[in-house]
Image (cartoon, helix red, strand yellow):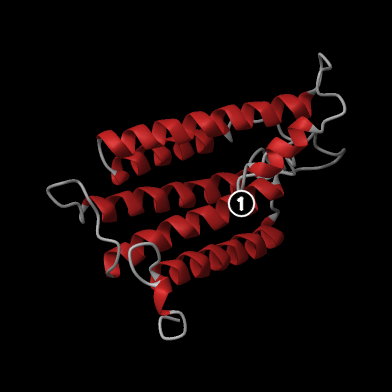
């Protein structure tokens, strides 16, 4: 790639970083999605397991980044450990997007916020008192913005790995919340256990 587009490498773009990010994002999405089809994408046990793996990947990336910090709390933009951290984060992100789609919550888009903004402003019931989809979108966008601001503050005041630790802690909290979400009502004669029933 650098031979074809030499200006794409440098201070702004690192072609190996982009390749690892996209490759691991797609690979993780593929694995999570296909395994989800086999075990049931909305089963509580699968959601908890998948979230635990994602959380572990974020903490692993934070650990790799902590090992790379220099005396100015800066990270190198290339190298094996940089690629490893990118791979961990891209894998967590790919799995998270697949997980959110399996929950069938169209109001919450984890890949980009523009769709949620658009759906919010064109909602025909935008100003109705009781509007659960609008409330979900608005809540998602508020938390999204607060997360960006908190992450930027932690990054600026501390370091990138510190921001990842906070992010991983948030994912751990979401994993814990899956234990308390309501499940679909079992069908008559259904013997599925609590962990096996899809979330409602």
Answer left or right for 189 relative to 115: right
Residue at the image point whose x is 19% and y is 52% from the top: 69
Residue at the image point whose x is 69% and y is 62% from the top: 38
Mark 1 crowdedness (10 Å alpha carbons): few <14, some 14-19, many ≥20 = some
Residue at the image point whose x is 58% and y is 27% from the top: 142
- Image quarter in which the C terminus is found: top right
In the depicted view, which residue is nearer to us: 32 or 45? 32
Answer left or right for 33 relative to 159: right
* Image height of 90 relative to 78, above or below: above
In the depicted view, which residue is nearer to us: 45 or 22? 22
Classify residue 119 by image quadrant.
top right
Q: Residue furthest left?
A: 71
- Location of mark 1 (residue): 97
For label 1, the SS is helix
In the depicted view, which residue is nearer to us: 136 or 154? 154
Q: Residue furthest bottom?
A: 3
């Amino acid at each position: 790639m650098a031979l074809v587009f030499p200006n794409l490498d440098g201070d702004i773009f690192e072609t190996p970083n982009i390749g690892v990010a996209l490759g691991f994002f797609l690979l993780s999405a593929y694995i999570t999605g296909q395994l989800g089809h086999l075990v049931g994408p909305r089963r509580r046990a699968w959601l908890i397991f998948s979230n635990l793996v994602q959380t572990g990947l974020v903490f692993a990336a934070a650990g790799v980044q902590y090992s790379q910090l220099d005396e100015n709390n800066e990270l190198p933009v290339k190298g094996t450990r940089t690629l490893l951290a990118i791979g961990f984060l891209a894998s967590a992100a790919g799995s998270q997007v697949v997980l959110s789609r399996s929950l069938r919550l169209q109001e919450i888009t984890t890949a980009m916020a523009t769709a949620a903004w658009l759906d919010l402003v064109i909602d025909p019931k935008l100003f109705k008192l009781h509007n659960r989809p609008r409330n979900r979108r608005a809540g998602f966008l508020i938390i999204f913005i607060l997360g960006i601001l908190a992450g930027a503050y932690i990054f600026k005041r501390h370091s990138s790995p510190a921001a990842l630790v906070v992010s991983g802690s948030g994912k751990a909290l979401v994993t814990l919340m899956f234990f308390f979400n309501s499940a679909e009502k079992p069908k008559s004669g259904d013997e599925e256990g609590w962990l096996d029933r899809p979330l409602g």
